[in-house]
Amino acid sequence: MRERSWWGWGYDGEGLADAELDALARTVSARFALDGGRAVPPEPSELGLGAPRLEAPPALAPIADAGPRTRAAHSLGGSYRDVVRALRGQIDHPPDVVVFPRDAAEVAAVLDWCSSAGAAVIPYGGGSSVVGGVEPDVGEGYAGVVSLDTTALRGVVEVDAVSRAARIRAGTLGPDLEDGLRPHGLTLRHFPQSFECSTLGGWIATRAGGHFATGPTHIDDLVESMEVVTPAGTVQTRRLPASGAGPSPDRLFLGSEGALGVVTEAWMRVRPRPRWRAAAAARFSSFGAGSVAVRALAPSGLQPSNCRLVDPLEALVNGAGDGRAAVLLVAFESAEHPVDAWAASATECLAGVGGMLDADPWAVSDDAASPPGATGAWRRSFMRAPYLRDGLVRLGVLCETFETAVTWDRFDELHHAVTAAVRDALAAVGAGEGAVTCRLTHAYPDGAAPYFTVLAPARRGDELSQWATVKEAATDALLGAGGTVTHHHAVGRDHRPFYDRQRPALFAQALGAAKRALDPAGVLNPGVLVDGASPGPAPPGAPPGVAWGQGRSDGPAPEGT
Amino acid sequence: MRERSWWGWGYDGEGLADAELDALARTVSARFALDGGRAVPPEPSELGLGAPRLEAPPALAPIADAGPRTRAAHSLGGSYRDVVRALRGQIDHPPDVVVFPRDAAEVAAVLDWCSSAGAAVIPYGGGSSVVGGVEPDVGEGYAGVVSLDTTALRGVVEVDAVSRAARIRAGTLGPDLEDGLRPHGLTLRHFPQSFECSTLGGWIATRAGGHFATGPTHIDDLVESMEVVTPAGTVQTRRLPASGAGPSPDRLFLGSEGALGVVTEAWMRVRPRPRWRAAAAARFSSFGAGSVAVRALAPSGLQPSNCRLVDPLEALVNGAGDGRAAVLLVAFESAEHPVDAWAASATECLAGVGGMLDADPWAVSDDAASPPGATGAWRRSFMRAPYLRDGLVRLGVLCETFETAVTWDRFDELHHAVTAAVRDALAAVGAGEGAVTCRLTHAYPDGAAPYFTVLAPARRGDELSQWATVKEAATDALLGAGGTVTHHHAVGRDHRPFYDRQRPALFAQALGAAKRALDPAGVLNPGVLVDGASPGPAPPGAPPGVAWGQGRSDGPAPEGT
């Protein structure tokens, strides 16, 4: 049976082989001076995690694991700083125990236990957070930390073929979810880069961005109803195609990052597997020129399934281009009708804004096989990227991504400001040879989601400080240029200070009040979105161990201009 | 200058002329026995509204109006029971004063005054609520009621042509909004039936359903950012095409029905005016057969702008058919490309599920004139319907609509159950000759929004009780069959008891907590969504006049099965 890597992406033994790492080192050395070192992850038993401060009560003992490997694997997510720390054996905040509830009742029992014991609870799905969303760094005042792993809540449990909806348990990993739908001829069409090692519940809790580059793409739009277990009880929303009955209950929990409750299952909108597909690549003289094409395609009503613009350097790195042109990957898919007319309209649109296309640009396919042409190559490279990243980190390369979304009127300014800020910051931390590239991952009529990749030679031992400097400069720049702190990576603990600047202060107060209604003891994922320690007085029955009222203040700064 | 009718739809002098009313009476008499009476609305000065209990402070006096006509016009919305009461001169809950703030600062001043005076505030846009959303029926414990009319906050104030977005003040009525966008070649494409007499702020506060029958159609999806003035301060969300940074602040206020704050302006996603259009009508042997076609078209990716199925009797009444077939109106529109391929795919789809189409079914248009074919006729009838309704009420006809949304797997059951419940209830109240018809107004991949119209002879003086019986039976049936209490009419006061059964109890608690954070004195639209009187202890500074803690309990019943 495959075992998940405790320190990096994916599964043990499926990362880069030694020969692949050698080849990668040769490639990178052409650009960066590497020290020749190759970090090797320690064994979990050597990490010195310390004795657990908590023990699961007898009723929960059968679903609890306090072994070092399990604790280590639930100590970090998948960000650059997480991988760096794991390779160093630096586990700053291990959970005391990991529990694997098998149904909603067991989730409720875990929350009851933690609320009464004053223990923090970190909901944990696939562990792919790149923003510190699952790291048990909860601050003072808790009797311990329990990582609540949802992956025993798995499977597609009911399919409504008439409504094209499926009831799916929240801990189902991407591949298992698609495996469960495939016999019905259905698919969710939600393929974040973390697909292999992330769960439906994680996607919902973080408002994941998915497969489609245009149209409804966030998981938000695919949720028909959900079940959420909170310390105060269970919320079951009604299956509805749409509703105008007050603010949407689902939307309160979408993006709540485990701070309001644990999503245990959801009815999801699914669809038949696509039969007709077409894909093309258009080249543009610059990233800016390509962005004009994206801005033309996004509101056209054509709704391409792929509409991803890659800047010249990134195209060179991932093989989509020769480094001289920006490359726009466009694709259409349908289960219902041929897409020729859509492709023809897109060709006309692209040519009209300076796109360079081959004479017969569209690779087409009329079965449900893997997507045609450049899109297929791009997809395979995309899904393999996290393994590559781990290899780069082992070689001593600073390698991280961040993303945002911004309206078109400020897009050029944001792209310029962020790129300049990252370059300046890299120079300031002694990594001036580093590069920053950009692609547009999602396109909207009123804006786009730029996704930045930073590659630079790191100084061993100093990586966290180097990255912190770059990250702060980048985020300052993107917030200043009107972007959001995250389009689909979530807030977590890493983005929290920036999120506090972005969100309206009164919304923070309203959200904090909602949290206190659902999580009176303040045990759920403290520090993510809202502080576990409430600014109000302790409610009746709050455990004495919780530092009630002593947390960081919620978002006092007004919305920036 | 046109003056709004104080008692019914639209503008004085634009309702049915006497000759039109005569013709209507003859038509209706063929089916129902009418008493020959013709109710006439009283003059506002004859209503005996009583002296105002409140007077605006001197600083707000210039924007205040306590005259009987203005008070009367802000006493009721536009439902059947509202029109019946207005025609009787039965004004149960007049506001004490109406204020017309001209900017966000004046809105804040009104909320400050009301919070300190213990007066309830009813945000009022176009006054088109059909669910008691603007009626000052706030319960005991308030020093008075202020109706806050937003229509002095009007106009399109900024257009971002690059991002296709416009900043629009919340009190802008539909026609003024489109007038403001037209010089820029832009349109919001949001045309609820109340378009002429409803405002952007009202659409946002009630999650209005719009023009498009498929795809993103609720106003929710068109909001880029908003400004909301609450008693605790102002919330300004960030202009973003999309974001994954925590639960969406906008979504908390979308559907908040004036209970959390007053929307003062919003950046809205707009689009070029359509150039290519095509429209067709397909007939089906029954409403059920037609619904199968809608269920096939909705998830096809074709996204018809119109996809409205009308049952045989309703088609007969509104002239779309001969009463023997259900009629499905389908249309496409685009500002970017011809829609022939879309129309051809739709023809194939409709024919494949038993649709009867003419040999050359598509009426096409390639300019921005009014839509072609049956869709245009339907639109004109649709926009004129509220005037017709007022005429019917004057003649003594019970005439009301209600709507819901339900997943496809339960659609047939819901349609049958609701129709049967209404027929039984009509018989029980002595109106067995009455009819109930249905159309599908919006179609989703996983379900549809059925919209019911009830027409029956009313018993003068007994109309409210008759309708209450029918409404309760209908709503019981639709909730029991898995529907929502409202797809786009909102909750208001009329749906509140049913909404309390539908929404999860814990969500009600979270929403109530959020309200207390934003509206500590509980003055905003009390009784709508959450009670003004909080279940918690009075916060510091709560006015003694407010019945804090004595309100109706918030949604104690769990979500139904």
Image (spheres, coloured by chain):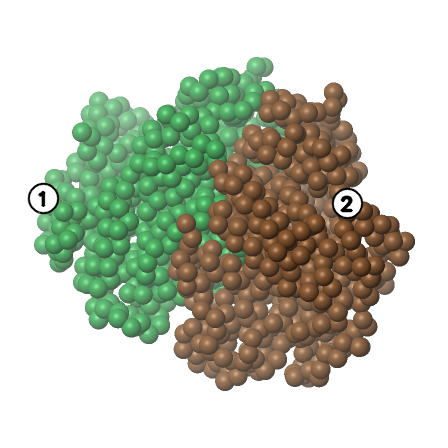
Chain colours: A green, B brown
Q: Residue at x 55, y 70 (%)?
A: B526
* Amino acid at pointer 2: Ser
Measured along the vertical axis of the image, is residue B300 above or below residue B407? above
Q: Residue at x 20, y 48 (%)?
A: A99
Residue A58 is left or right of residue A547, and the answer is left
Near mark 2 (Cα within 10 A), the count class, few <14, some 14-19 or many ≥20, is some
Q: Position of residue B265 (x, y in %)?
A: 63, 60
Measured along the vertical axis of the image, is residue A319 above or below residue B147? above
Q: Which residue is mark 1?
A: A46
Q: Position of residue B98 (x, y in %)?
A: 69, 74
Measured along the vertical axis of the image, is residue A5 above or below residue B432? above
Residue B381: mark: 2
Disc 2 chain ID: B
Q: Is residue A289 visible?
A: no
Q: Residue at x 20, y 30 (%)?
A: A2
* Amino acid at pointer 1: Glu
Residue A93 is left or right of residue A513, and the answer is left
Residue farthest to the right, as pictured = B19
Residue farthest to the top, as pictured = A360
**Which of the two discs, 2 and 1, sits closer to the camera?**
2
Foreground pick, A289 / B383: B383
Q: Residue at x 83, y 59 (%)?
A: B36
